[in-house]
Amino acid sequence: MRSAISNLVYNAVNHTPAGTHITVRWQHVTHGAEFSVEDNGPGIASEHIPRLTERFYRVDKARSRQTGGSGLGLAIVKHALNHHESRLIIDSSPGKGTRFSFVLPERLIAKNCA
């Protein structure tokens, strides 16, 4: 789970322009706990959304491993979330920003840990 969270935060920091506002949040929802990373950056075109979790897929084909990572980050997130009975939800609009989120089922959340 740590790798999923760190990959989502890393992507928000490294794939948005300077000055972009990034919000990282955990919140209790009806059916579990929701984690989200949201930004007001340039957004992602809709044709890329279905492929973002494919291994080695890059939105910017000009980037190489030396300049832009391995293209495995969101594939790792998808795998980790599947292991915890969750899935990655991606909402994005060009010019308005992107939101990556997932919900962990209630049964995986520690009770009374305060």
Image (cartoon, helix red, strand yellow):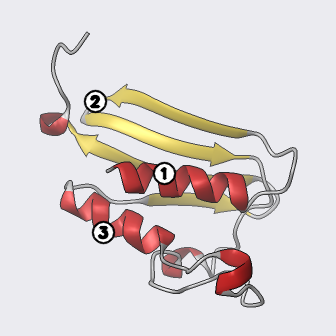
Q: Foreground: 50 or 78? A: 78
Q: Which residue extends farthest right?
A: 19
Image quadrant holding the C terminus, namely top left
Residue type, numbered disc 2: Thr
Residue lying furthest left in this view? 107
Q: Position of residue 98 (x, y in %)?
A: 65, 55
Q: CA distance from mark 1 to mark 3?
A: 14 Å
Looking at the picture, tell me which residue is in the foreground, 68 or 110: 68
**Earlier along the polypeptide chain: callout 1 or callout 2?**
1
Q: Is residue 68 above or below residue 21?
A: below
Amino acid carrying label 3: it is His
Mark 1 and mark 2: span between their CA atoms?
A: 25 Å
> Which element carries disc 3, helix, strand or loop?
helix
Say which element carries label 1: helix
Establish if 11 lies above or below 61: above
The residue shown at (84%, 56%) is 17
Q: Amino acid at mark 1?
A: Ser
**In front: label 1 or label 3:** 1
Q: Which residue is mark 3?
A: 79
Q: Earlier in the sequence, mark 2 or mark 3?
A: 2
Q: Is residue 91 above or below residue 36?
A: below
* Residue highlighted by disc 1: 6
**Disc sitting over residue 30 in the figure:** 2
Q: Residue at x 50, y 43 (%)?
A: 36
Horizontal placement of 49 versus 42: left or right?
Answer: left
Q: Secondary structure at mark 2?
A: loop
Label 1 packing within 10 angstroms: few (<14), some (14-19), many (20+): few
